[in-house]
Image: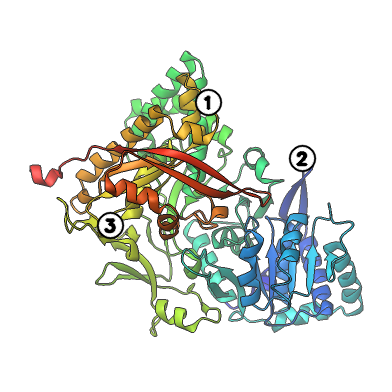
């Protein structure tokens, strides 16, 4: 594809100037930005950045939530041949230092006062950071920081330059090529410093177009952009595919209004990680448990029909006339209103990725008429590696290779990928690039899996995490921690889990409860509690989680490869795992090694057979203060089951 992001913007502005490109909700009212207005805004910002000194090949940090003017600034930087580097808006100041210094960043755009404060805080460690522009002026009136300037003032200066130099912008855009670097995304950094993943216009747009072709996306789609722009998944859906297809991207007013905004927009194309779908379903089930007897009975009766009939209808399989009638009635009374309440009444394609999704959760959404599917990809592959066809969506696979992708499985079970969307390199890290990218173009995903009989890819775990038990009755048995953790997280009462067992005689786990789901469960049983720590310590909650663990063990017993991975002992953690405390990445992936070190006394207690263990943990609050949480955690023994193959 011989084009670039700015060229696509100019194409849309020329062909459909008055059509909506983006919407932003301000003070409860949706404001529309047309393609013509977006192009003019990008030109003004690009001209101003040129005057300020941004040059071709330089990096520019953009930090904030999804906002039209932040997207316009990324396009403006690309128009000049510069490279936008989006950073996570919820990252603490210290996490911004490495990316800024690694990329030699002189210019940054911050959404608001919170982001400006972070950038000012790190300036002493980042002396090359010359200019900080901000979009939202609230709270910044009395700031006198050198190089700090409002985006409005920047735009005004750009308007003057563009008027005096009418051919400058178009000339700069035309100077760009498809093989120029388009963006750099920093990986989560589960171990060590994050790595800057370098992508070209060609690679990102090829994958965006491949995904669009697969699901027949058009300019008529409506998308809600509510996930961090620094995450490549959100960037592909609301930036790369936005420009490739020309559809409308809607920006919520705030994180707290996403549920309301979802209902108002009614997106046709939707993406969320499994935990978002889990949260939506948990809220539905909590409301149903609180509903009257008649509503509850109707809901459960209709859902019984939906689970039996819905997926088959969704996949275009034959269904009897009576069942079709029952489903149609259920759609009228329950499924339709439920889709509308969730904001999914117009969804044509919905995707989830990032983690495995529970079969029950997956089936629930498909059974009520939502075309929920899974995809497989990563930052390094520009997301689209495997996608699920509409009539082949399954909870245990991640789909078939999409156009242009080749997949092979190495002898150690690792998935290797060849694709037009592969990273160009890790920035200033040739050793890391050589580790993941072979001379003949194969990318090492670090994921273990296989292609099943239907041509679908199935992921088991990370290659480096797949281990073996040592000693005990399951000596030598395979241990796949992520697989076990995901099975535990399929239960609505479990938000997060961390499993250990490699080179040990048994598998043990630490569990985070879902505060909302377990809290509602406790309230319905008149079980009083005073916050998360108190609720997590209740013996009744331990029994609830024990039931979940033992159901997982029963499932694992039927798996010939992983029967030895059953959880023998577990505990419920006294605090939620948090990215600010270093326990999760910014994309909410468990940092298993870090957690093992931080909670070493708990890990030791699990394996030493202790019934309980005292722990005191330092925590960081949202305002930057630190404190500590302490508790004596009960350790619970769970039933393990003999492998079914042994009984055969």
Q: Nearer the viewer, residue 10 or 73?
A: 73
Q: Is residue 272 left or right of residue 61?
A: left
**Category of crowding for the residue at label 2, using alpha-carbon neighbours closer than 10 angstroms: few (below 14), some (14–19), many (at least 20):** few
* Residue wearing tag 3: 454
Residue under the image location 44 percent in, 33 percent down: 537
The kind of secondary structure element at disc 3 is loop
Of badges 1 and 2, the one in the foreground is 1
The kind of secondary structure element at disc 2 is loop
Image quarter (top left, top right, bottom left or bottom right) of the C terminus? top left
**Category of crowding for the residue at label 3, using alpha-carbon neighbours closer than 10 angstroms: few (below 14), some (14–19), many (at least 20):** few
| Image height of 149 relative to 621, above or below | below
Q: Is residue 82 left or right of residue 464?
A: right
Of badges 3 and 1, the one in the foreground is 1
Image quarter (top left, top right, bottom left or bottom right) of the N terminus? bottom right
Q: Is residue 485 left or right of residue 30?
A: left
Determine which of the numbered discs, if any, sits on residue 28 in the image.
2
Image coordinates of residue 21 in percent, x first then y, are 71, 57
Q: Nearer the viewer, residue 150 or 69?
A: 150
Image coordinates of residue 290 in percent, x first then y, are 51, 21
Q: Residue furthest left?
A: 648
Task: Give the image quarter of residue 116.
Answer: bottom right
Real-space CA distance between mark 3 and mark 2, rounded to the nearest whole angstrom: 48 Å
Q: Is residue 3 left or right of residue 525?
A: right
Q: Nearer the viewer, residue 265 or 125?
A: 125
| Image height of 531 relative to 564, above or below | above
* Residue wearing tag 1: 287
- Is residue 428 something that shows in the picture? yes
Real-space CA distance between mark 1 and mark 2, rounded to the nearest whole angstrom: 26 Å
């Amino acid at each position: 594809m011989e084009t670039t992001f700015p060229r696509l913007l100019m194409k849309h502005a020329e062909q459909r100037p008055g059509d909506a490109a983006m919407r932003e909700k301000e003070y409860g009212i949706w404001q529309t930005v047309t393609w013509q207005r977006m192009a003019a805004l990008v030109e003004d910002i690009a001209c101003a950045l040129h005057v300020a000194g941004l040059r071709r090949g330089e990096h520019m940090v953009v930090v904030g939530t999804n906002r039209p003017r932040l997207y316009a600034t990324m396009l403006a930087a690309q128009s000049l041949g510069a490279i936008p580097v989006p950073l996570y808006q919820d990252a603490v100041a210290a996490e911004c230092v490495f990316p800024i210094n690694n990329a030699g960043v002189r210019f940054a755009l911050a959404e608001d006062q919170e982001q400006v404060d972070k950038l000012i805080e790190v300036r002493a460690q980042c002396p090359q950071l010359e200019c900080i522009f901000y979009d939202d002026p609230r709270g910044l009136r009395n700031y006198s920081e050198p190089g700090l300037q409002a985006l409005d003032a920047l735009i005004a200066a750009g308007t003057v330059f563009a008027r005096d130099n009418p051919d400058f912008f178009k000339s700069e855009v035309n100077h760009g090529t498809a093989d120029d670097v388009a963006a750099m995304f920093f990986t989560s950094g589960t171990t060590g410093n994050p790595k800057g993943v370098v992508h070209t216009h060609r690679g990102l747009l090829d994958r965006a177009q491949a995904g669009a072709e697969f699901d027949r996306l058009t300019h008529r789609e409506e998308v809600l952009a509510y996930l961090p722009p620094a995450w490549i998944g959100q960037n592909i859906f609301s930036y790369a595919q936005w420009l490739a297809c020309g559809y409308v991207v809607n920006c919520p007013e705030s994180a707290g209004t996403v549920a309301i905004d979802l209902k108002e927009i009614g997106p046709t194309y939707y993406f969320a990680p499994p935990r978002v779908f889990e949260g939506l379903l948990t809220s539905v089930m909590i409301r149903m448990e609180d509903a009257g007897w008649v509503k509850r009975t109707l809901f459960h009766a209709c859902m019984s029909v939906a689970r039996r009939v819905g997926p088959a209808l969704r996949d275009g399989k034959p269904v009897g006339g009576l069942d079709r009638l029952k489903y149609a009635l259920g759609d009228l009374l329950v499924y339709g209103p439920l889709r509308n309440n969730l904001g999914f009444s117009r969804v044509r394609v919905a995707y989830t990725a990032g983690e495995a999704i529970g079969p029950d959760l997956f089936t629930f959404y498909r059974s009520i008429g939502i075309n929920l599917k899974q995809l497989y990809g990563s930052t390094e592959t520009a997301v689209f590696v495997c996608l699920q066809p509409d009539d082949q969506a399954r909870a245990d696979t991640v789909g078939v290779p999409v156009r242009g992708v080749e997949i092979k499985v190495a002898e150690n079970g690792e998935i290797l990928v060849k694709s037009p969307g592969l990273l160009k390199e890790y920035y200033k890290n040739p050793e890391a690039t050589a580790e993941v990218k072979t001379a003949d173009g194969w990318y090492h995903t670090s994921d273990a899996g296989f292609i099943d009989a239907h041509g679908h890819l199935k992921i088991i775990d990370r290659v480096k995490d797949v281990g073996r038990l040592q000693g005990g009755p399951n000596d030598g048995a395979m241990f796949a921690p992520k697989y076990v953790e995901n099975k535990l997280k399929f239960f609505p009462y479990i938000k997060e889990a961390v499993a250990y067992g490699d080179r040990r005689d048994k598998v043990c786990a630490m569990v985070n409860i879902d505060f909302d789901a377990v809290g509602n469960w406790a309230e319905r049983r008149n079980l009083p509690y005073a916050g998360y720590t108190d609720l997590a310590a209740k013996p009744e909650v331990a029994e609830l989680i024990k039931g979940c663990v033992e159901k997982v063990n029963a499932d694992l017993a039927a798996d010939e490869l992983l029967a030895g991975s059953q959880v023998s002992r577990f505990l419920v953690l006294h605090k939620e795992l948090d990215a600010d405390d270093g326990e999760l990445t910014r994309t909410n992936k468990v940092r298993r090694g870090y957690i093992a070190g931080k909670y070493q006394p708990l890990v030791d207690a699990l394996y030493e057979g202790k019934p309980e263990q005292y722990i005191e943990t330092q925590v960081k609050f949202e305002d930057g203060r630190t404190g500590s949480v302490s508790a004596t955690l009960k350790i619970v023994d769970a039933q393990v089951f003999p492998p079914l193959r042994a009984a055969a």
